Amino acid sequence: MKIELKEGERVDDLHRNGFQIIQNGKLFCFGMDAVLLSGFAKVKEQGTALDLGTGTGIIPILLAAKTQGRHFTGLEISPTSADMAARSVLLNDLQEKVEIVRGDIKEAGELFAPASFDTVTSNPPYMMGQHGLVNPDLEKAAARHEILCTLEDVVRAAAKLVRPGGSFFLVHRPFRLAEIICTMVKYGLEPKRMQLVYPYVDREPNMVLIEAVRGGKPRMTVEKPLIVYREPGVYMPEITEIYGY
């Protein structure tokens, strides 16, 4: 399907099922964290999934390519990003499987029925207000800093919308790991699986992937570390497999 691009937009190849995504290089584009989350998350056959703060729709589109799920929904507050995501859905002829909803994570409990998804995912802003420099552009700032929603807002929404026994998958920064686990437990999401991501084998981890189960019993598996680069510019085989090229 031919989709009209707006000023500054481009179409990027996702190397999965021939899928592509519309992005604007002047705004916030998806990064490795979103791709790694799509490889870590699981959606059961015929299952339904919701991505909180979907940006340009990268995670629902990748999950549609990688899993046997029945339907995928992306929730995004930015009108610009939500519009690009919706046009990417049309570009890939995924309108029967993927829906983009414009709305606020803090109001997600009113936008969707409680316990209506088998899987919930999120790649939320990592930084609290006092962390680092805040971009003067609101959309860029909101993608990195907790301006429009907090970690607790995301976890609260996930806990309300995922079914009992369903999973919430999160990618975040290790320096907030204690807060992440405490917040998940507070809302009845039991951390069950965790993987730390290291840029190089001799560096500190810069990402953490976590799966929590609603109403799960206390027991967490820590998976082997995921190393991104063998050397500068050369991915490790596991990363190449996740990316699909």
Image (cartoon, grey):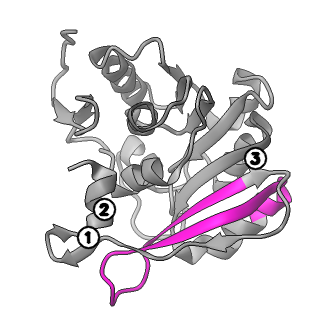
User: Residue 72: x, y in percent?
Assistant: 53, 27
> Would you place residue 144 above or below residue 103 in this image?
below
Q: Is residue 96 left or right of residue 107?
A: left
Badge 3: few (under 14), some or many (20 or more) residues near its Cα, within 10 Å? many
Question: Is label 3 or label 2 in front?
Answer: 2
**Can see residue 148?**
no
Distance from disc 3 to disc 1, alpha carbons, whole Å, reads 35 Å
Q: Residue at x 83, y 67 (%)?
A: 218
Q: Earlier in the sequence, mark 3 or mark 1?
A: 3
Residue 30: give x, y in percent of width and height. 33, 46
* Residue 57 percent location from the top left of the image: 41, 32
Q: Which mark is residue 156?
A: 3
Q: Mark 3 or mark 1: which is in front?
A: 1
Circle 1: element type: loop
Q: Is residue 58 visible?
A: yes
Q: Amino acid at mark 2?
A: Ile
Query: Which residue does the image show at 41% across and 43% down from the upper left?
Result: 138
Give the CA distance from mark 3 to mark 2. 31 Å
- In the rendered structure, the answer to whether residue 220 lies left or right of residue 53 reads right
- For the residues labelled 2 and 1, the Cα–Cα distance comes to 5 Å
Residue 211 in the magenta stretch? The answer is yes
Q: Is residue 193 left or right of residue 91?
A: right
162 is higher (above) or lower (below) than 32: above
The residue type indicated by label 3 comes to Arg
| Callouts 2 and 1 close, C-beta under 8 Å | yes
What residue does disc 2 label?
A: 239
Residue furthest out toward the bottom: 202
**Which element carries disc 2, helix, strand or loop?**
helix
Q: Which residue is at 30% across, 81% downward?
A: 200
- Which image quadrant is residue 234 in? bottom left
Which residue position holds label 1? 236
- Give the extent of the magenta segment: 183-212
